[in-house]
Image (cartoon, rainbow, N blue to C red):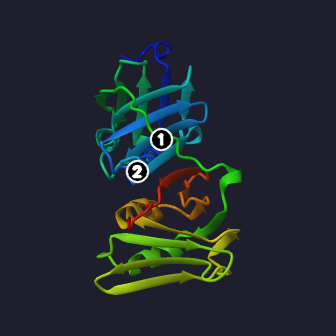
Amino acid sequence: MNSNTNDYILVAKMGLTNLRIAIELLKTVNFKEIAICFGNENGLKVTVEDAKCIQASAYIPRTIFDEFKLKEDVMFSLSLSILVECLSMFRSTSEENSIAVQIFYKGIGYPLSIIIVEDGVITDCSLQTLEVDTILDFHLDTGDVVNKIVLQTELLKDAMTELDSTSELVELCLSPEEPFFRISTEGLGGICHIGFPHDSDLIDTFQCTSTVTSNFKLTHIKQAMKALLCADKVSLRTNNTGLLCFQYMIKTESGHVCYVEYYISPLIDMFD
């Protein structure tokens, strides 16, 4: 079917090691069924959004593909769960040189084709693509950022285990003065404050110019924390309205860097 790749706008290929990385990236944002896929010369971005208040994107750079050909920028929607399931259709004991994955996309109205060749056995998947719904343009320009912290992921991992799971909300305070960096919850166990020393060896960058205290849904924060399991570092950024961005840096075995990004809107006028 894919002998003439000139018919396709997108042609991409990868081996098992990078395939596992791609699957891991996609799983960190797989909290909604439908995702929007963007393709450009830099690679692929897969974005999901929930209730216009949390948006997550997994960036799969072209550097982790053995081949990445794109005639023009593309954008389409599909089922993220089915995409992950299709990409995972190989034996867990497979070796690197026994797997080859090929991805093809012909354009609007056509399915996304995935072919997995494993020890001569071919699995051919065809994923229906959908019309793209409008999503919010979450972003933080450099000039809008008032607070930025870059830290080692183990610091947040430890903090997340201490949060009161009975609390509905999480309060995040970032400040150039004490408490500097603090996460708080209030649940059945009472009020819990977790403070982070701004001069810790596990904090690479601490640039706070304004005190910003915002509240978020605990479910949204926990969702954003999924990427902690595979990331090396995480950057937290806020603007003066409290919009929060988590950007995770994930290093591959071959030395390439991938990113997962979460934007979470603060809760406004909670007590009105």
Percent coordinates x, y for residue 15 in the rendering = 46, 41
Of the two numbered discs 1 and 2 on the same chain, state the one appearing first in sequence: 2
Element type at mark 1: loop
- Residue drawn at (42%, 15%) of the image: 3
Quadrant position of residue 151: bottom right
Q: Residue 85: x percent and y percent?
A: 29, 43
**Residue at the spot of label 2:** 29
Q: Secondary structure at mark 2?
A: loop
Q: Position of residue 264 (x, y in %)?
A: 47, 56
| Residue at position x 39%, y 85% in the image | 191
**Amino acid type of disc 1?**
Leu
Q: Quadrant of residue 2?
A: top left
x and y, in percent, of residue 231 in the image = 51, 61
Is 242 situated above or below 101? below
Instruction: Report the quarter where the N terminus lies.
Output: top left
Mark 1 or mark 2, whichever is nearer to me: 1
Mark 2 residue crowding within 10 angstroms, few (<14) / some (14–19) / many (20+)? many
Specify the quadrant that holds the C terminus: bottom left
Q: Nearer the viewer, residue 204 or 91?
A: 204
| Mark 1 lies on residue | 136
Disc 2 residue type (three-letter):
Val
Residue ID at (66%, 57%): 145
> Height in image: 159 above or below 46?
below
